[in-house]
Image: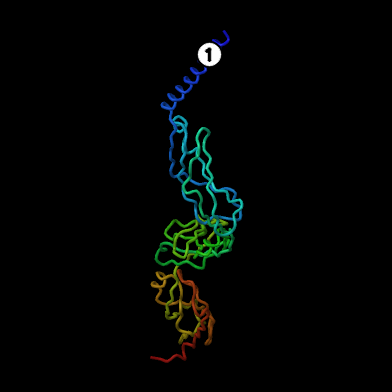
Amino acid sequence: MMERIKNNWTAKLLALGMSILLWGYVNIQRNPQLDEIYRNVPVEVIGLADNLVITNKPPNVQVRLAGSRTSLAAVSQREIRAYVDLQEAVLGSNLVPINITAPNGVEIVSVTPAQVNLYVDQILEERWPVSVRFKGELPEGYETLETQVRPDFVFLRGNSELLNEVKDVFVTVDLMAEQPDNNIFNLTVEVISQANQLITPSLGVNPTWVEVSVPIQQVTGQKTVPVEINTLGQVAAGYEIRAIEVNPDTAVISGGGAALEQIEALILAVDVEGLAETTTIAANPILPEGVAEVEPTEFLVTVSVATIDTLPQN
């Protein structure tokens, strides 16, 4: 009796084993083990000290995963993380392995490339003066005077290789744009390399903008004109003006070009009221409209007078 029971259990176990094998075979056929390649997986950099920077970006990698058809189908490339740990990095070249993490249920078979050589440099800070560049032209007859920049320097922050490439730090004033009040601009600072390439985005710039004051005035010209006398008042009764002399008899006027074209002579107003003898008067000119300066600033006018009965008779 016992022998029959044992034989029965042996048959049952054999049947169970066959069932498991058959189930496994069928399941493998339905959901076989496969490999899947994920290309262009970006590599993250972690662990790098705040005062260090890498000068070459790690390339994207290719990751091969293995797993069942169902497991692989559930994997999104965004769930695959590739990274290098630069916590122990030194200045210069660092050959470091590329680490991979993937979702549960799949196996990491390989990563290509398996390691990468990254160059680590120190972040430095340099002080640079800010220059001013002009774009466009002012209307005819106007010019810019000396510009003022506040502050007139900025700090650039970056690796030594990049800082060595800096050629100029500048702001650009557009002279054709609408002029702000008092000709004061708030302008963004730009940086160019020795190859005249804009490298501002690759550097830290502090401050990122400066205030620029651009005084604008009318263009001044010069012109030499004769000096003419305009008398005011009357000499004393019984006297007449015999001659008027002015020293110097020419003047150099400075001002806007358009205004100078309209001026043919510099007029001096001399008060002769009540004069009864020859008199020398120091006269100062009144600046005509559009004239900024007259040289000299003082003229000596000699008014010769004589009694009417001593004048030559015709």
The correct choice, above or below, for 280 with respect to 10 in the image is below
The correct choice, above or below, for 64 with respect to 301 in the image is above
Colour convention? rainbow
Query: Which is more toward the observer, 270 or 192?
Result: 192
Quick one: label 1, few (<14), some, or many (20+) residues within 10 Å? few
Residue 222 percent coordinates (x, y): 44, 76
Residue 251 percent coordinates (x, y): 46, 80
Residue lying farthest to the top in this orientation: 1
Residue 232 percent coordinates (x, y): 49, 76
Query: Which is more toward the observer, 228 or 122?
Result: 122
**Residue 51 lies in what quarter of the image?**
bottom right
For numbered disc 1, what is the local secondary structure? helix
Query: Which is more toward the observer, 121 or 309?
Result: 121
Which of the image's four quarters has the N terminus? top right
Q: Is residue 240 visible?
A: no
Which of the image's four quarters has the C terminus? bottom left
